[in-house]
Amino acid sequence: MTIPGARGASLVDWSSGLALGAAGCSPEAGTGRDHETTAAEVAELARLAFESGAFTAAAGPRPGPGPVEDMIVTAQDSYHLIRFVETSFDSSVFLYLWLDRTEANLAVALFRLKDITARLVPA
């Protein structure tokens, strides 16, 4: 939550849609929804992108993690970032970050997410 503009974050399993951990607020907190609801909804988007053939390189699939490293969704007042966690096993986990658009620096947030996810799984 030390990333500039961060309002909420969740570690999510996209195969089940469950939030494995959460901090801060949910983007839908004012509607009575919580991190679990947000995690389930964002997991659908992540699953579609990760499993889509549209994002595979023109030369075909490459060995290693899926074709998508991260996703950025921009809304009128916010950014929503998804960063897939790379592991040596078949991982279905991503880090979701909700940022206030007026306070956030998108480049800084992306670099910080990359660093955080790299530290989640030891090499």
Image (cartoon, grey):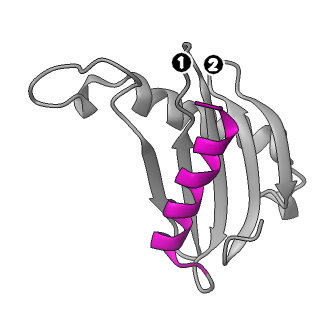
| Quadrant (top left, top right, bottom left, bottom right) of the N terminus | bottom right
Mark 1 residue type: Ser
- Give the label on residue 15, or none: 2
Q: Which residue is mark 1?
A: 88
For the residues labelled 2 and 1, the Cα–Cα distance comes to 17 Å
Residue in view at x 30 percent, y 17 percent = 63
**Magenta span:** 104-123
Q: Residue furthest front?
A: 123
Mark 2 residue type: Ser
Within 10 Å of the Cα at label 1, are there few (<14), some (14-19), or many (20+) other Cα atoms? few
Q: Image height check: is 50 above or below 16?
A: below
Could you tell whether 47 is left or right of 24 in the image? left
Q: Specify which label sits upstream in the sequence, 2 or 1.
A: 2
Which quadrant holds residue 123? top right
Could you tell whether 110 is left or right of 78 in the image? left
Q: Residue furthest bottom?
A: 102
